[in-house]
Amino acid sequence: MSNRADEQSRVLGGLVVLGAVLAGALFLAGLAAQSYWAIAIPVALAVLFVLGLVVWIGWTIATVQTEASGDPLPAQGGPGSATQSADAAPKAPASTDDAAQSQP
């Protein structure tokens, strides 16, 4: 009790398997004949496939559009930083003389 889509999938899968077996047989026949093309064509196809993936990944990274989510981060100024947060007032370094004079 399979429907038409299942049957089409099985036929397509069978054709893919048949194509792969024929390509493998052709490759082995080329190797047996010591043909340069038996190596050059699969290597060229593999290289072009990998380069196509790299181009696709690069294009995806370059064209992705993101929206900022959440609250913006406050400016944080730390030691040696050129900026300070608006909340933090600059503090003078505590000297040891001030601490000694405040004790009785």
Image (tube, grey):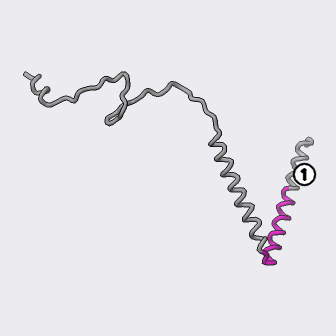
Picture coordinates of residue 46, whole percent (x, y): 72, 60
Vertical side of 29 occupied by 14: above or below: above
Quadrant location of residue 75?
top left
Picture coordinates of residue 8, whole percent (x, y): 90, 47
Q: Could you tell me which residue is drawn at 68 percent across and 55 percent down?
A: 51
Q: Pointer 1: what residue?
A: 11
Residue occupying the far front of the picture: 82
Quadrant (top left, top right, bottom left, bottom right) of the N terminus? top right
Vertical side of 101 occupied by 51: above or below: below
Q: Could you tell me which residue is drawn at 33 percent across and 24 percent down?
A: 88
**Boundaries of the magenta span:** 16-35
In the image, 74: left or right of 16?
left
Quadrant location of residue 17?
bottom right
Q: Could you tell me which residue is drawn at 63 percent across and 42 percent down?
A: 62
What secondary structure predominates along the stretch shown in magenta? helix
Quadrant location of residue 65?
top right
Residue occupying the far bottom of the picture: 33
